[in-house]
Structures are given as structure tokens and as C-alpha cells.
Image: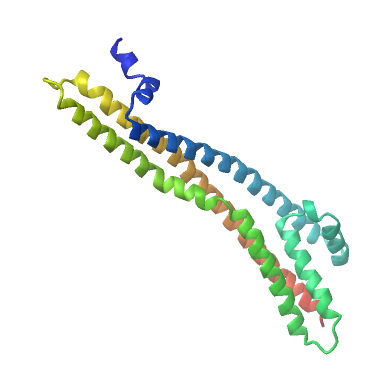
Amino acid sequence: MNVSQDLSILHLIINASAVVQVVMLLLAGVSFMSWYYIFRKWFTVKAARAQTEQFERDFWSGGDLNSLYQSAINDRHSTGSMERIFESGFREFTKLRSQKNLDPKDVIDGSRRAMRATYQREMDSIDSHLAFLASVGSVSPYVGLFGTVWGIMHSFRGLSNVGQATLAAVAPGIAEALVATAIGLFAAIPAVVAYNRFAHEIDRLSSRFESFMEEFSNILQRQMR
């Protein structure tokens, strides 16, 4: 068997020590889960952005608020986050406004609290699994480094049984150890890039939701006069 065959990636993985193989398997599983959540989050954020833009166009087109509210109720399973925030705020506004002897400020505050509660639920849903990507990005390189250190230690222990240490004797053990670091980086880099991108997009959505709540509260306040 020649050197290139000895140092092939598959050969190195198969012949790695048990601990290094466990590390590689763990990192491979984490990488698979990371890519699953990356694609899932990409579709979630894309859909949330499109639904938000569509509702903003409908809301600021000057349509009747009652019509928008009925539309939100009828299409509840396909509405976006901003539309659900609007629905909860307008529902609470309508309920409190029908009560007699209630201060207008209390009506607006109640509507704002209802929107804030829905906003928190929506952000929790959009933010889901984002912490997993952050953990993968920060921890995977160190797990891979642990596999590398262990593999190199295992390789050096094997040299104690060899009369003469040569590059041919050391290279396979060190190479198989470095594969663990490579797999760790392969898992970490996409997770870090995706996390930063999604965090930025979610922050922008959060700002749009908060701005809408304030603007909608002002509209409701004008209707109370």
C-alpha cells in the first residue's frame, strides 16, 4: 500500500483510535443537524419577511381596520407574525372599547400589552434553534481540537514500540488526528456564518414589529378621540 492510500481521508477515519472516531461521529452528527436547522431557518426567515412586507402593504394602503381584522381571523393559519400582532391588538382594543367608564388610556395600554405578548411569542418562534447554531459555531472547533490532541497522544504512544521514529511512522497518526479538527471546522464555520446572518435578519424583523406596534397604537389612540 502506498503513502497516498495510507493517508486517504476514508482510510484515516477507519483506522483512527476509538476516541477520535467517536469525536468525528459526534461532529458529523452535529454538522448534519446544523445544516438541517440552517435550511429550516432560512425558509422561516424568508417566509416571515415576505408575510411582513405583504401585510405592511395591505395595512398602509388605507383599508378598513375591521376588514383587515376579519381577514386575519379567517386566514389565521397562514398569517404572518405582524398580522397576528395586529389581530391581538385590535381584538383587545375592540373588547376594552365596548366597556363603559373605561379610560381611553387604559384601552390603549391594554391593546399595547396584548400586542407585546404576541410579539414575544412570535419572536420566540422565529428565534428557535438559533442558539443551537451559536453553540455549534463556538464549541465544535474545541471538540475537534480535543480529538486532534487525543489522536496525536495516541500516535506518540505508539512510537514507544518502534525502534526508530520516522516520518512514515508518525504521519498517519498525526494526519488522522488532524481530520478531527477539519471536521470540527467544517461544522463550525457554516453555523457561525448562518447564525450571524439570521441574527441580523431577525433583528430587522423585530425592529419592524416594534415600530408597527407603536404606529398602530397611535392610530388606535386617535380613534378614541
- Classify residue 210 by image quadrant: bottom right
Side of 176 relative to 209 (left or right)? left
Above or below residue 40? Residue 84 is below
The residue sitting at the top extreme is 1
**Residue closest to the eye, 141 or 89:** 141
- Classify residue 16 by image quadrant: top left
**Residue closest to the eye, 123 or 160:** 160
Image quadrant where one finds the C terminus: bottom right
Q: Is residue 63 visible?
A: no
Above or below residue 163? Residue 217 is below
Q: Position of residue 25 (x, y in %)?
A: 43, 34
Q: Position of residue 139 (x, y in %)?
A: 40, 47
In this figure, what is the number of numbered marks? 0
Q: Position of residue 217 (x, y in %)?
A: 73, 73
Image quadrant where one finds the N terminus: top left
Residue at the spot x=45%, y=38% of the render? 187
Q: Position of residue 175 (x, y in %)?
A: 29, 26
- Classify residue 67 by image quadrant: bottom right
Residue at the spot x=34%, y=31% of the render? 18
Residue at the spot x=37%, y=33% of the render? 182
The residue sitting at the bottom extreme is 101
